[in-house]
Image: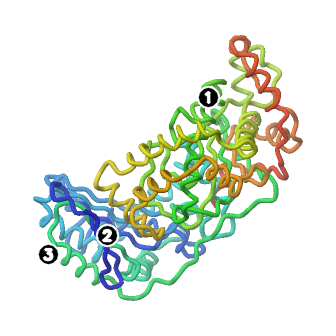
Amino acid sequence: MIISLSAGAQQVVELKQPESNKIVIRLMFRNGSITDPKGKEGLTAATASLITEGGTSELSNQQIQQLIYPMAARFSSSVDKEVSIFSFAVHKDFLEKFYPIIKGLILNPSFTEADFKRVKSNQANYVDQVIRASSDEEYSKKALEDLLFRGTNYQHMIEGTIPGVASVTLNDIREHYRKFFTRNNLSIGIAGNYTGSFLDRLKKDMAALPATAAPAVRPGTAITPDGIQVEIISKKDALGSAIFTGAPLAVNRSSDEFAALMVANSYLGEHRKSYGKLYDKIRSVRSMNYGDYSYIEWYENGGSNMLPVPGVPRSSNYFSLWIRPVQIAEGLKKQYAELKDIQVGHAHFALRLALREIDNLLKNGMSDQDFELTRDFLRSYNKLYIQTPDKQLGFLMDSRFYGRKDYIQEADALLAKLTAADVNRAIRKYWQVNNLFVTIVTDDSEAAPLAKALMENTPSPMSYSNLVKEGLPKEVLAEDEQVANYKLNVKNVSIVDSKDTFK
């Protein structure tokens, strides 16, 4: 049973589950990285991390971990552009023992110097090293956001910038906590077999947070580029070219038209799913990479999450394509003697192929058959988002952010009423291929030749080994010729050294 009510300035979302033996609490503050002061980028993330990775006024972090271990309880924090969320889960039999820890962390965080140094060091290491080394998927995606939102409060990574994190002090965190983690921008979510008296206590205790109204911060909006603007990130010893391309999208889950874009997006290719058009053309037919996907909103930690997760609702939106790393010329030359003379690897061809698929979709639209199959799949797939009480509660709270009651349920109803004409009308209204940002993380040996090829719009014939080419149907090779000469509206290409990103 779902209940939503107001508790003073607090919104409360309830998910009653009388048969459950678990209690889940989510505290969402309308305070994300967009509230980071200029020059202190990463402050919100540091504050939230210190709250959950530090102690309380009565217990150290080590003592808390020792106490909750026998309970199998857990808690964590997450920060996105516009929200900060604290999540707690415990078996109902241990709720009374666990609750003082919840209350202490949120209302009386210890904010010790030792905990601060540890949290700051980890965050600085992520911004300075990990993002560049661990996943070119996340690297190129966050580099794309840096381009899309340049000059706005949406530009910097949630975790901050190198100088931003370095400048954060413990006093900054204490002040940011008092200023932005207030009862007036808090939403409470609770799921499981809890009592009314416990909920009353939780609401009363959270009302002890500062009563000041957090300063209003307007979210930045994505920039529409003039033509295709490419930023190539030159990285030493990169194994391939990781590509992310995107453009502003004027709708999000708050709009009924979003359901139509969900169908088109799924047709092109859901994250980590092998049935999409892009995946079929780039990976399955041509064996160019591991996967190729489409997105109509931010996808959190795509390297780990096979399904979308709650807790990242955003006002400002964009459409994007992720082309997983394709081979560079240096690697192809080493593997195949017949390719010893190529100058550029597969990135130029892959980008052309992906954008040509969208262009064809805009021109020709989805067929009735493709629409029916994709829409029916989506109506089942979306329900997988809420397999656990934690995720069900999370999506319910996100729904309120967008002015909806139950996004998953409402999306299903919207999908049921859709037609192929609705989808084709929506994509022609919101999608295009001529004005895009593109980020490509590639090896330093590939950066300059690729930049020249893109800027000059030179043909980019697909480079197959002889063995692979011999096994391809004639229609694929004929399409390759069309792709190789497909004109991209490239207006600017720049090369950035990896060490100079996110500053």
Q: Where is residue 492 in the image (x, y as percent from the top left)?
A: 83, 52
Label 2: which residue? 13
For label 1, count other residues whose C-alpha is less than 10 Å away and answer few (under 14), some (14-19) or many (20+). some
Q: Mark 2: which amino acid?
A: Val
The residues bearing labels 1 and 2 have C-alpha atoms spaced at a distance of 43 Å
Label 1: which residue? 283
For residue 74, side relative to residue 365 (left or right): left
For residue 379, side relative to residue 390 (left or right): right
Check the image and name the residue furthest to the left: 93
The residues bearing labels 3 and 1 have C-alpha atoms spaced at a distance of 55 Å
The residues bearing labels 3 and 2 have C-alpha atoms spaced at a distance of 16 Å
Q: Mark 3: which amino acid?
A: Ser
State which tag comes first along the sequence, 3 or 2: 2
Q: Foreground residue, 69 or 204? A: 204
Q: Where is residue 407 in the image (x, y as percent from the top left)?
A: 43, 60
- For the residues bearing labels 3 and 2, Cβ distance under 8 angstroms: no
Residue lying at 85% horizontally and 33% vertically, measured from the top left: 485
Q: Foreground residue, 288 or 238? A: 288
Location of residue 303 with respect to 87 vertically, above or below: above
As drawn, the label of residue 312 is none
Residue lying at 79% horizontally and 23% vertically, measured from the top left: 478
State which tag comes first along the sequence, 3 or 1: 3
Q: Mark 1: which amino acid?
A: Arg
Residue lying at 54% horizontally and 55% vertically, measured from the top left: 259
Helix, strand or loop under label 3: helix
Label 3: which residue? 197
State which tag comes first along the sequence, 1 or 2: 2
Tell me where residue 151 sits by quadrant. Answer: bottom right
Q: Where is residue 124 in the image (x, y as percent from the top left)?
A: 50, 58
